[in-house]
Amino acid sequence: MLTKILKEADIKRLTELVKRAERIVLTCHVRPDGDAIGSTLGFAHLFSSLGKEVKVVTPDQAPRSLTFLPGFRDVVSFTRYSDYARRLVSEADLLICCDFNTPSRLDNFASVVTDAKCPKVLIDHHVEPDAFCDVSFSFPEMSSTCELVFRIIAAMGYYPEMNVESATCLCTGLITDTQNFTVNCSDPEIYEVLMKLLAKGVDKPRIVREALKVKSLDAFRLQAYALDRKLELHSDSHLAVVTLSASELEEYRYERGDSEGIVDRPLEIKSVVACFFLREDSDCIKVSARSISDFPVNEICKKLFSGGGHVMAAGGEYKSGTLEDCRRILIEAIPSFEKQLRECYKKGN
Ligand code: 5GP
Ligand code: MN
């Protein structure tokens, strides 16, 4: 039995809202990942089977690595179909926001969501959520939003109705946010959730392969190049920095999602405690950070790159200069966190 962490009153409210709604729209953060798409589609498959009209609307396009997910092709991206997305939101009776804690994570889609007249529900595992929804399920201790969605569905009494499509999507978020149960997976209950999803017929090896491993030859070579040629080590090799410029990305015919996983790899080096990956996108320098031993990369991302996230997996966007400016800001900030870097290294060794 899973520990009861959800407030009964909130579950009752959500159940009422779902029962009353004919049209439900689910949304998630910009540059959606497995947990964002998994949680929204996981709910969508369940609500569809209950006879609801359901749409997942994302701020921008989801990565190719997730095309294997059932229902992926029906996801509406606001950047591509903004009028349609606006209409879906205006006609919805219920709006469910998954895997983000502030409207700014919706990019240009933010005002559409905040201006929506229908009730809004937040379902998320990031710290310090903004109060922009009528009902909030905010549980930073959860491994993933998908784990939280599973618990909510179970608490609503809909586990028997959960189909293999829904279970597959939810299992994907569990797998991507825990990197196939290697990080954020110390709570024994996550394996109970996994067991209950597998019982629905989920093909776990396929999810691991599609969502975490398989990539195009260009993406494979880009990653090899980044790790071989663009890796810098600082602070007694406790800090890794990888940068990729727009021209380097172009050389490898970069497509969205191709750099997924680069930021994790330097942590395989024994001395490395934290890694920052800086990528020159068309509208910003995208910062991605990972760490071990509770080194708080989210605080650094918040302070330097108006970002945030989890203690050991965070990110941000830098919009006031070049890739080199962004890199310099990070390097110049090293003295402010070097001591903590060393302490975390000692803790982990
Ligand atoms: P990733 O490196 O996979 O893009 O993001 C890892 C985590 O960092 C995400 O789950 C999210 O919590 C956080 N994150 C990434 N980018 C941003 C950002 O631009 N702003 C904020 N607030 N959080 C971010
Ligand atoms: Mn997540």
Image: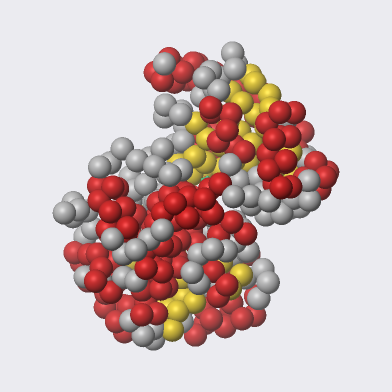
Quadrant position of the N terminus in the picture: bottom left
Of 159 and 336, nearer the camera is 159
- The reply to whether residue 52 is in sight is yes
Judge from the rendering whether residue 136 lies leftward or rightward of residue 264; answer left or right: left
Residue at the (52%, 19%) spot, across then down: 270
Residue 332 image-quadrant placement:
top right
Residue 267 in percent (x, y) is at: 53, 28
Residue 140 in percent (x, y) is at: 36, 47
Of 285 and 211, nearer the camera is 211
Judge from the rendering whether residue 63 lies leftward or rightward of residue 148; answer left or right: right
Residue at the (59%, 13%) spot, across then down: 236
Question: In the current view of this chain or complex, which residue is farthest to the left?
Answer: 1
Residue 78 image-quadrant placement:
bottom right
Q: Is residue 227 above or below residue 133?
A: above
Judge from the rendering whether residue 20 lies leftward or rightward of residue 37; answer left or right: left
Judge from the rendering whether residue 302 lies leftward or rightward of residue 138; answer left or right: right
- The reply to whether residue 130 is in sight is no
Residue at the (61%, 26%) spot, across then down: 240
Quadrant position of the C terminus in the picture: top left
Q: Is residue 83 above or below residue 155?
A: below
